[in-house]
Amino acid sequence: MSGPGGGSGGGAAIRTDALTKRFGAHTAVAGLDLEVPRGAVFGFLGPNGSGKTTTIRMLLGLVSPSAGRAEVLGEPIPDALRRVLPRVGALVEGPAFYPFLSGRANLERLDTADPLAPPRTRAARVAAALERVGLSHAARKRVHAYSLGMKQRLGLAAAILLPRELLVLDEPTNGLDPQGTREVRALIRSLADDGTTVFVSSHLLAEVEQICSHAAVLRAGRLVAQAELGALREGARFRFEVRTPDAAEAAEVLRRFGVEPEPAGPGIVAGVAAHALDGGGADRPAHDGVPPPEAVVAALVAAGVRVRGFSAGAGSLEERFVELTGEGFDVAG
């Protein structure tokens, strides 16, 4: 697949090698090895303050790394910024506009400043960008009267005035209502369908789950996971939950299966399977390191545990990210 800017479909759109940024004694990003495939919608996840925006600023040449290397669209950053940036659209840390100009006038000024933007198609491209982000009705309104969500949409419009090979979006749904969030998700999908690689930084898990093909997870400036989204889900540990008045007896049975139990509420015992078991035995058969649920139920009944409810299954993506970061994510859409 060729990207809109004519780039190759193979290789990485973004690649970093031990990328590091220090601010005095504080290390904001530590030894980051990141690889974003071309054509992907790549979710860059982490709790607030984990180093996501600092990484983006290094990728765009806004701050210099303290150590390590970065490549964007196959070119070294910051050395090749003049060649790379015209092929990249970005929305970082909220858009800034002239407040007493209209949305349309702001986009026209930005487009005029771009040496690669053809003047003859400017009006049509500005109108198309406004329509694509749902701002045609507010094109003539001055930006100081825009809501936060409308300003965020205008920033997205600015990022897509020209076809781009790579779109870098830092919290793109910030300030949007649920309808606006859905529209931005649809926009990102459509851009990816057109061949654009989209790099989305977010702390909103639902956003990433619905639009991304790949994801990386940061914790305190360090990369703790990076894979296709499905592979990250598969890494979630298998969870068992037993509803019973015989909590102590149920906990003992779960321990025999390599599941460390914990109270999960009145009359509920829950736990996650160990990553690997010893191959099982007559009363503990193993299946990919996870005891079969039917074997657990049979053992509970044989031990005289009164089972009022039972569930077993892989943990959610949210649980997986909490395992990786030790912190919760905002799962609201």
Image (cartoon, rainbow, N blue to C red):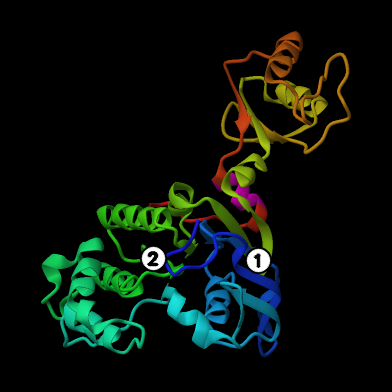
Residue named by callout 1: 34
Q: Residue at x 22, y 76 (%)?
A: 121
Disc 1 crowd rating (10 Å Cα; few below 14, some 14-19, many 20+) is many
Q: Is residue 179 above or below residue 173?
A: above
Question: Identity of the amino acid at label 2?
Answer: Pro
Q: Secondary structure at mark 2?
A: loop
Does residue 61 appear left or right of residue 20 in this picture?
left
Residue named by callout 2: 172
User: Most prominent secondary structure in the magenta stretch?
Assistant: helix
Q: Which residues are magenta?
A: 318-323
Residue 273 position in % (x across, y down): 73, 34
**Residue 73 versus residue 89: which sits nearer the camera?**
73
Camera-nearest label, 2 or 1 = 1
**Residue 65 versus residue 251: which sits nearer the camera?**
65
Residue 129 position in % (x across, y down): 25, 68
Q: Secondary structure at mark 1?
A: loop
